[in-house]
Image (cartoon, coloured by chain):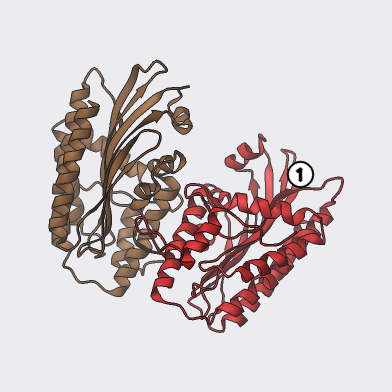
Chain colours: A red, B brown
Amino acid sequence: MKKQFYTYIQNLQDTITSKLEELDGGATFVEDLWKRPEGGGGRTRVISEGNVFEKGGVNISEVEGELPQVLRDNLEVKEGHFFACGLSLVLHPKNPMVPTVHANWRYFEMYDEHGELVTQWFGGGQDLTPYYLFDEDAVHFHTICRNACDKHGADFYSMYKKRCDTYFWNAHRNEARGIGGLFFDYLKETEEFSLQDRYDFVIEIGNSFLESYLPIVAKRKELSFTDTQREWQEVRRGRYVEFNLVHDKGTLFGLKTNGRIESILMSLPPKVQWHYCHEPAEDSEEARLVSVLKEPKNWLSF
Amino acid sequence: MKKQFYTYIQNLQDTITSKLEELDGGATFVEDLWKRPEGGGGRTRVISEGNVFEKGGVNISEVEGELPQVLRDNLEVKEGHFFACGLSLVLHPKNPMVPTVHANWRYFEMYDEHGELVTQWFGGGQDLTPYYLFDEDAVHFHTICRNACDKHGADFYSMYKKRCDTYFWNAHRNEARGIGGLFFDYLKETEEFSLQDRYDFVIEIGNSFLESYLPIVAKRKELSFTDTQREWQEVRRGRYVEFNLVHDKGTLFGLKTNGRIESILMSLPPKVQWHYCHEPAEDSEEARLVSVLKEPKNWLSF
């Protein structure tokens, strides 16, 4: 399964980066291959100052080693080794009418002190962070997510959509980071689902990513915008930074376990602003976005 | 002591904001009075888009209530009430030749379930974060810190200077946030020092703040700078954000205990950039700064 999934994400990285380059039409991804002293490594691909994408990364990595303390505490195990691999992507478009997107699909194995496999699972998801909210874009994104889920489990979409809203919650601001999508973790083998079923589900989601996001980018990338709208985008990007540095378990895990800092923090937006008590004008498009983020919506009628 | 110290920081806030306005010559501080539903409140004063200061805040607050869970865990107590008051300031200058400064002086009381005072202490410090390093500025700042310390304890400067270097350490980057200053906490009454001695020490430090910082600002504020130097400042400000959101106990405590978000996050710089793998050129002034941050220096010969 390790090999099967890593081969899958290697190919997916190629597909995604080549389609994004095509859509951008300006910049191309720059590749960094890196090794982790404790074992494993990765292939980081970043794009910057493109026609469409101001900054972004589509990274894969495969790491193994002794289970770090923080994970031992979380999993309530005393010792062991782990293997983890995954693809992580974040894209920050230049135009504030185009949403930021984040996705991650990962596979994890844990071994006991004798090197025996103890458990294994998949995790991941994808979510959208608009600066200006086009309802039809939100509906499109969630429709693709639901269609991919429905092929594998009747309750998958509603379950993982809710988890996404719960996870990407900027608790100190009492608002969501974005308009959600899917979030799942610890997808283990059960009586109902084999590990191969889990794999099939995760790659279905991974394969649906481009269809969920690219049409939105294509539709919005040529829209005009004002300096004030651009400022709003940079202020909202501040909330993105706050979530990733204060709440995101993946980021904090990476920072505390000697992860590759530049690959982890490629998720941070290129230009960001913080103003004291910045409030959108009443009844503005900016205020409408915030009100939706305060109370996550069901975008699809069931 | 509560009243004595709160009166002191009220007056100190007035002195500091009026001197900063004078030096800025463009913007003035805007005041926000706020109340905390659980008890207490504060007086937030922020400045923005001045001639010298792009963003800054000089805030005082006085809060009381039930001891929050996170503090109970830290202090290893089961229940109790607390009182805390302090002044916090952060100033982000526009010109990259002028360093950012942070300072905080605070007083804390803790009571048992019967409302009896259990313990009380002072904490605080001040530290400097340059974007371009003028050695003489670092020496000036540390000299004022040392002179203030020396009047109260022979080992205070060396002790609190070291604590400052240890505290403002961006562990995930393996570098200091800035070039340090002073950091002290849990200054309780001991056989050697009465609570009044502690108070006298803390106000000596507070009173020395303007002398430690203003001459540096006055000397550097008219220096010319390039777009590339400004970009460097915005990139380095990213490290400031990383420290405050990932490592700073005060910020995280505030975010997790329903503090006033806008007063806490006024510490974040106004405009910030993150680039993938941004590295200063070899033998540049930027590289020299980073090398000093990697290995905190003793700025004064003892």
> In front here: A30 or A172?
A172
Where residue B218 sits in the image (x, y, percent)?
A: 13, 59
Quarter location, residue B105: top left
Quarter location, residue A117: top right
Identified at 62% across, 70% down, the residue is A137
Relative vertical location of residue A126 with respect to residue B248 in this rendering, above or below: below
Where residue B124 sits in the image (x, y, percent)?
A: 28, 38
- Quarter occupied by the C terminus of chain A: bottom right
Q: Which residue is mark 1?
A: A119
The answer to whether residue B302 shows anywhere in this view is no
Q: How many numbered marks have been drawn onto this rendered protein structure?
A: 1
Hey, which residue is sitting farthest front in the picture? Answer: A283
Relative vertical location of residue A92 with respect to residue B266 in this rendering, above or below: below
Chain of the residue on which disc 1 is drawn: A
Quarter location, residue A119: top right
> In front here: A62 or B182?
B182
